[in-house]
Image (cartoon, helix red, strand yellow):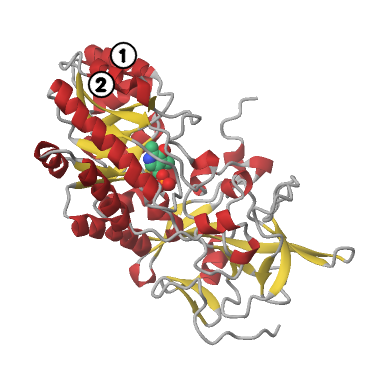
Amino acid sequence: MSSTVVASEPAWAIPGYLETRGGHLNINGVDALSLAREYDTPLFVFSAPRIRSNIERLKEAARAVEHPMKFCYASKANSNMAVLRTVREAGIDLEVNSGGELFKALRAGFRPEQIIFNGTSKTPAEIEEAVRAGIYSINVDSIYEIELIEEAAKRLGVRARIALRLVPEIGTRSHLGLQTALLTSKFGISSLEVLDAFRRSLRHPDLIDLCGIHIHVGSQTPDVEPFAAAFKTMWEHLVTIHRETGHTLEHINLGGGIPVNYLRDRSMANELPEHERDMLGAELEPSEVLRAALRAARDAARDAEAVHLLERVTILLEPGRSVIADAGLVLTTVRNLKRRPETDDTWLLTDAGYNILLSMNNYKWYYHIINASRADAAHDALYKVAGPLCDSGDVYFDIEREGRLPDYRKLPAGVGSGEVLALLNSGAYSLAQMFPYNGRPLPAAVMVHEGGRVELIRRRDTYEDLISNDIW
Ligand SMILES: *Cc1c(COP(=O)(O)O)cnc(C)c1O
């Protein structure tokens, strides 16, 4: 098989992490094809050094703005235990969204004061688990929930730390399904209820320690403005509460949403609608977000007391995607191919379906694909690409013909069965959302470490796993 060789490193390459060697994709020096051979595909591959450098970027942002900060990795993006361990060892804290994620957090060695619990429908049992553990903050989603927390605190004879999650109607340029500060979203306490909620939280100080306010504007937020507007609004609430009650909140939690650039290689960018292109290709430094947020609050601070409060408040961020998305990829093998002379198309059928990359289906999320077997070959031939599921929607393009994904993917000419493809930037909201539809055993995952050490961090399901919970 002959193909043109591109002289320089491809646009998707990241020196020291994603590179081509001997024509193959390498991850921190480890040959992707040897991983596919040893562990089979589909296979999730994560890079511990990349997770660490993503976290280091957050810490640098904190140093740049010289402000007290706390970072809580949003574990829903990927709560594999080895990922959680890597995050913990890199020195940041954790955000969880369920009793199950709280369990995993504690099991992974996070201390209670490192954990934040969010969620719209917490059960009494989950609330009790969080109150008993004594976590940093339970983020309250409604006035009603304050009562539930009080009851749990009373039962257990402890004081629960809470923050109020607000929903101040702030839009972003991300998908509607990923926006969470709109009144049409299910999250949080609306502006007209905020003061009531604060008063309610302060009624039983023996049971409730109101320590913060929270907002999450949504995922993959491409601009600083929504973060700045959100912070300013939270900040104004903090000042109002202080003036009205004398109570000083310790922290403002600005949520997650720092975007990841899914279009470092822009060879398919023109095939995407403009708003998708802008959103998916966003480059936003955490330090810019923090600077804009602090500036907005400072500009709104009316007196010295307000400025003083601002200097003392801890800012929390809950980054998920920006920690793990570009630290992971999926290796998949072409298992079948076909021609359709009527449409002059070549189809590649892979072993990676939307059961392991749900976002590709429900948000039409774009993951750039490269040929890991011939990573340095020119990717200039067009293919229809699809997964293995018995479902017409299991394709790598927009089956609804709304053009949200490119109709074709570019790979080297003459791709054959057995060649390995890589779906880049697929470490977030993928492994965490997978399901064994069609009797497909869930894939294995490996973590690549410095020096090329490879660690199996999730074994592939067996057929027996497929029936392990069924009773018949
Ligand atoms: C999902 C979520 C996050 C993480 O969002 P990313 O876009 O992955 O950074 C943070 N906070 C809350 C409350 C969330 O629901």
Choose between 409 and 348: the one closer to the eye.
409
Residue beneath the point at 25% across and 57% down:
61
Which amino acid, mark 1? Glu
Q: In which quadrant will I find the N terminus? A: bottom right
Q: CA distance from mark 2 to mark 1?
A: 13 Å
Determine whether, in the image, residue 336 is placed left or right of residue 306.
right
Q: In which quadrant will I find the C terminus? A: top right
Q: Position of residue 408 (x, y in %)?
A: 71, 63
Residue beneath the point at 15% across and 21% down:
245
Choose between 240 and 318: the one closer to the eye.
240
Residue beneath the point at 34% across and 68% down:
450
Which amino acid, mark 2? Phe
Q: Is mark 2 within 8 Å of ligand 1?
A: no
Q: Position of residue 37 (x, y in %)?
A: 57, 67
**Which numbered circle lies on residue 198?**
2
Choose between 242 and 394: the one closer to the eye.
242
Residue 42 visible in the picture: no
**Badge 1 is on which residue?**
147
Q: Position of residue 232 (x, y in %)?
A: 28, 40
Determine whether, in the image, residue 103 is placed left or right of residue 432.
left
In the displayed structure, would residue 361 be above or below residue 156?
below
In the displayed structure, would residue 377 be above or below residue 240?
below
Rendered-image quarter of ligand 1: top left
Examine the image and state in which quarter residue 86 appears: bottom left
The residue carrying pointer 2 sits among few (fewer than 14), some (14 to 19) or many (20 or more) residues within 10 Å by Cα, namely some
Looking at the rendered image, the disc whose residue lies closer to the viewer, 2 or 1, is 2
Determine whether, in the image, residue 401 is placed left or right of residue 230.
right
The residue carrying pointer 1 sits among few (fewer than 14), some (14 to 19) or many (20 or more) residues within 10 Å by Cα, namely some
